[in-house]
Image (cartoon, rainbow, N blue to C red):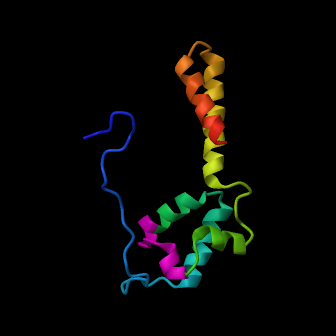
Amino acid sequence: MGRLYGTGKGRASTALPYRRTPPSWLKASTREIVTTICKLAKKGTPPSLIGLQLRDSMGIAQVKSVTGRKIIRILKHNGLAPEIPEDLYCCIKRAVGMRKHLERNRRDIDCKYHLILVESRI
């Protein structure tokens, strides 16, 4: 059942596996994974989408369990890390979209209120 004042629907969520070693069926080496991460970052892919692509294409659930470092640390080591954090970038992008909407729809009071909330996070 959904919550009255929130978007949550219960306690169910993903849980990380207890074992922190790479699975035995994974054939990709650490160097291959790091080069793949760097290639995707050079194309302009954000770190969260890099993790999704590695999960879907190569079957890597957690990059840290295979390489020993998180995606952001790998990108920082190779000089490919984004200038601002990804969550801040998404908040800014959302606020810009809301401002464009308000230029077209001046009387949207609900959007004005939510824009204040989003900008307070920034």
Indicate whether 76 appears above or below 108: below
State yes or no: residue 54 in magenta.
no
- Residue 101 image point, x, y percent: 60, 24
- Residue 94 image point, x, y percent: 60, 37
The quarter of the picture where the C terminus appears is top right
State yes or no: residue 64 in magenta.
yes
Indicate whether 109 appears above or below 60: above
Nearer the observer, 3 or 44:
3
The quarter of the picture where the N terminus appears is top left
What secondary structure characterizes most of the magenta part? Answer: helix
- Residue 121 image point, x, y percent: 63, 41
Nearer the observer, 73 or 43:
73
Give the magenta range: 55-67
Residue at horizontal 67%, vertical 69%?
A: 75
Judged from this view, the residue extending furthest toward the left is: 1
Image side of residue 106 versus residue 27, left or right = right
The answer to which quarter of the image holds residue 19 is bottom left
Nearer the observer, 53 or 115:
115
Q: How many marks?
A: 0
Image side of residue 57 versus residue 70, left or right = left
Nearer the observer, 65 or 15:
15
Indicate whether 62 appears above or below 45: below
Residue at horizontal 65%, vertical 47%?
A: 89
Image side of residue 18 versus residue 121, left or right = left
- Residue 108 image point, x, y percent: 56, 17
The answer to which quarter of the image holds residue 39 is bottom right
Residue at horizontal 60%, vertical 57%?
A: 46
Indicate whether 20 appears above or below 10: below
Residue at horizontal 62%, vertical 21%?
A: 102
Judged from this view, the residue extending furthest toward the top is: 107
